[in-house]
Image (cartoon, grey):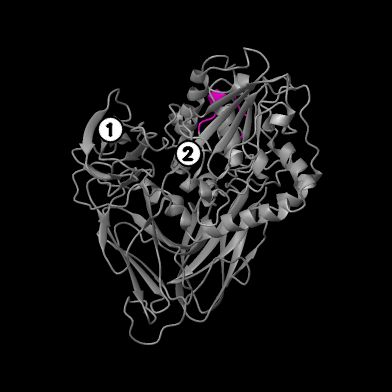
């Protein structure tokens, strides 16, 4: 849950002292606290941005984003020649931003396997500005020698009158200032909601880019990645609450942790009872060394992308022409909005935005591990690649051709073909291994898909309508023990988990209309097949489904959201240390299944029992479970009730 940090941030006493630069220091929260005090309206603007972010995520908008390309201007403010960093050092930093925000970084494989499924391609690219606010050609770099040898978080570097350089229009550019920051400060950023004249990111010249005077252990460009993350509305991963374990970064898929991490810790590093995986210290929004950082999560990506949705705080950047060469002179712009669709085991359709004046485009693609590109000339703004290798990641980039001139290649993008295996699955919805990557599917249409590996799982999103609200999910032709769950937004609603290859079915007679229902398909205990398909069909009805799958006769409503009170059964003690008793009142003899699940939904304990009319008791032992929060689900036919259980030994 997102905590109300906007009120508490003003009371934080944040400072940058004489800390040497061997420990990462970021002044973003210090700047935020100051701005909130100086600008009484900023707190409300930030609340509005948070509300917009939550609405964007809840509505499922995070699934429908296209790529964003942000023009960048770098303002170099230097006191001496050492601080006047080279163009090469600046360009190396832009390369790092493009790699890190597109999950093309060479060290992406260093993300622990437990978090690979939520590691995000944020679909945000960066280009050096090709034209300035007046429409004149520019390299995207401007320089000024100053009499100030050491700036601080007071934003003086952002104004010519105080020795710095003025910001360019924030609705068209990301402003990056590079200067000498005093007190060992590596950088700071302004969060969305701040003033236009100070909007952007400031980095120390010695911790910018990867060449020149870039200084270890902050010599791999991750200072700018961290600060641009703030500029895109991501907060420190520990929630800036010290070691209290009560803070939040507003992201559901980053573990709670106690304070920042420095250096490069060993995995796992556990705090705030977040075992067995511990802190996500390799996240770009922690304080570890550059060589230890390598990941943004899907949750962080959603926060970033909400800024570019209609009404978002940075949506104006979508229409910026800052990356385009000025008109005339035979110049040619750079394609943006790259996309990869219709991905199969051997093919994919690549698309991009049109460039004014372009007569054709050069498309380059290659396996991500290959050293050379294959180039094809394309007359339009899409191209179907075929003959690809299954289960492989490809990179691609596009260049516009305008008569006799060519523009610059776009930032590289990537896609991964479906896993191989000899089956005939259509499986046109991969990759869809997380809720944030769920693919929209039509209802009342059966299709085949595949759980190809032990770590593969499939998320699908669908909508019901006011005229057809009742939902039925059928999963058939199972090659192994597969299960399916139903969610609405983040709320768990129902599960079907028959043993073996028995068909699975969920019936959910509801009155709630939503565009964010999810079917989650996975193999029990890693079950998979890369040669056989399963069949999935989501059906809607205007009348209630019966338990036999028909719509005839009267049926009781079974709209049972995940709640933790009045859950239909008693349970004690809670918190528990050993044996737990569940009391179950029923009106007829029944067969019930009791499942104890961890927060990821994995079954830790499961009991099947025949119970009699009246009051019944079931006992189970949690003494072997780690401390933490669990969910106890009692299922009787299609009816499911769930309660929260705390294990605290």
Q: Is residue 268 visible?
A: no
Residue ID at (48%, 34%): 136
Q: Quadrant of the N terminus?
A: bottom right
Alpha carbon distance from label 2 to label 1: 24 Å
User: Which of the two residues, 308 or 349, is positioned nearer the viewer here?
Assistant: 308
Q: How many marks?
A: 2
User: Which of the two residues, 499 or 249, is positioned nearer the viewer here?
Assistant: 249
**Depicted 606 relative to depicted 152: above or below:** below
What x and y, as percent, mark residue 385? 22, 41
Residue ID at (70%, 44%): 245
- As for residue 34 lying within the magenta part, the answer is no
Residue ID at (38%, 43%): 455
Q: Is residue 468 visible?
A: yes
Instruction: Give the left or right position of residue 208, taking residue 343 as reference.
Output: right
The disc label shown at residue 55, or none: none
User: Which of the two residues, 588 or 470, is positioned nearer the viewer here?
Assistant: 470
What x and y, as percent, mark residue 605? 50, 54
Query: Which residue is denoted by mark 2 in the rendering?
Result: 322
Query: Which residue is denoted by mark 1 in the rendering?
Result: 364
Write down the region rendered in magenta: 285-294
What x and y, as percent, mark residue 43? 72, 52
Q: Main secondary structure of the magenta part?
A: loop
């Amino acid at each position: 849950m997102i905590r109300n940090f906007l009120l508490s941030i003003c009371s934080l006493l944040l400072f940058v002292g004489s800390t040497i630069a061997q420990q990462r220091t970021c002044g973003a929260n210090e700047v935020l606290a100051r701005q909130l005090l100086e600008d009484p309206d900023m707190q409300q603007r930030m609340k509005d941005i948070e509300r917009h972010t939550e609405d964007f995520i809840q509505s499922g908008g995070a699934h429908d984003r296209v790529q964003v390309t942000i023009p960048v201007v770098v303002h170099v403010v230097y006191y001496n020649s050492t601080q006047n960093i080279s163009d090469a050092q600046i360009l190396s930093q832009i390369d790092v931003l493009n790699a890190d925000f597109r999950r093309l970084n060479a060290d992406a494989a260093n993300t622990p396997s437990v978090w690979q499924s939520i590691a995000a391609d944020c679909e945000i690219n960066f280009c050096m500005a090709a034209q300035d606010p007046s429409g004149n050609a520019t390299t995207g770099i401007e320089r000024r020698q100053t009499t100030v040898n050491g700036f601080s978080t007071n934003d003086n570097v952002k104004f010519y009158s105080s020795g710095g350089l003025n910001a360019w229009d924030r609705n068209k550019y990301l402003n990056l200032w590079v200067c000498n920051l005093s007190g060992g400060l590596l950088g700071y950023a302004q969060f969305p909601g701040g003033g236009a004249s100070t909007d952007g990111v400031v980095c120390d010249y010695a911790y910018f880019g990867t060449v020149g005077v870039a200084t270890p252990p902050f010599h791999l460009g991750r200072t700018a990645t961290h600060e641009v993350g703030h500029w895109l509305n991501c907060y420190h991963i520990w929630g800036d609450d010290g070691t209290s374990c009560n803070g939040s970064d507003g992201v559901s898929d980053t573990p709670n942790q106690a304070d920042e991490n420095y250096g490069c810790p060993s995995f796992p590093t556990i705090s705030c009872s977040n075992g067995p995986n511990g802190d996500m210290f390799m996240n770009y929004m922690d304080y570890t060394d550059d060589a230890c950082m390598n990941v943004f999560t899907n949750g962080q990506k959603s926060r970033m992308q909400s800024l570019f949705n209609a009404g978002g705080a940075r949506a104006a950047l979508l229409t910026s022409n800052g990356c385009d060469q000025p008109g005339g002179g035979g110049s040619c712009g750079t394609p943006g909005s790259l996309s990869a669709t219709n991905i199969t085991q051997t093919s994919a359709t690549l698309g991009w935005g049109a460039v004014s004046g372009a007569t054709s485009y050069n498309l380059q693609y290659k396996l991500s591990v290959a050293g050379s590109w294959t180039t094809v000339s394309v007359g339009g703004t899409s191209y179907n690649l075929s003959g690809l290798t299954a289960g492989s990641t490809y990179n691609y980039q596009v260049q516009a051709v305008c008569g006799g001139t060519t523009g610059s290649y776009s930032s590289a993008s990537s896609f991964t073909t479906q896993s191989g295996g000899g089956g005939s699955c259509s499986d046109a919805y991969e990759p869809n291994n997380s809720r944030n990557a769920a693919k929209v599917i039509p209802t009342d249409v059966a299709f085949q898909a595949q759980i190809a590996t032990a770590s593969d799982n499939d998320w699908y999103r669908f909508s019901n309508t006011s005229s057809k609200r009742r939902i039925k999910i059928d999963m058939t032709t199972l090659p192994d023990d597969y299960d399916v769950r139903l969610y609405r937004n983040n709320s768990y609603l129902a599960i079907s988990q028959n043993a073996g290859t028995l068909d699975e079915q969920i019936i959910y007679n509801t009155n709630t209309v939503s565009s964010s229902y999810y079917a989650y398909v996975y193999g029990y205990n890693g079950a998979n097949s890369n040669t056989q398909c399963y069949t999935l069909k989501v059906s809607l009805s205007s009348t209630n489904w019966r338990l036999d799958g028909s719509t005839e006769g009267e049926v009781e409503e079974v709209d049972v959201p995940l709640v933790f009170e009045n859950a239909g059964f008693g349970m004690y003690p809670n918190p528990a240390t050993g044996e737990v008793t569940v009391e179950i009142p029923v009106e007829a003899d029944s067969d019930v299944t009791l499942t104890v699940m961890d927060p990821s939904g994995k079954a830790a304990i499961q009991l099947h029992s025949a119970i009699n009319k009246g009051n019944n008791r079931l006992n189970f032992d949690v003494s072997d479970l780690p401390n933490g929060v669990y969910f106890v689900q009692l299922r009787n036919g299609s009816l499911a009730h769930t309660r929260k259980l705390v294990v605290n030994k």
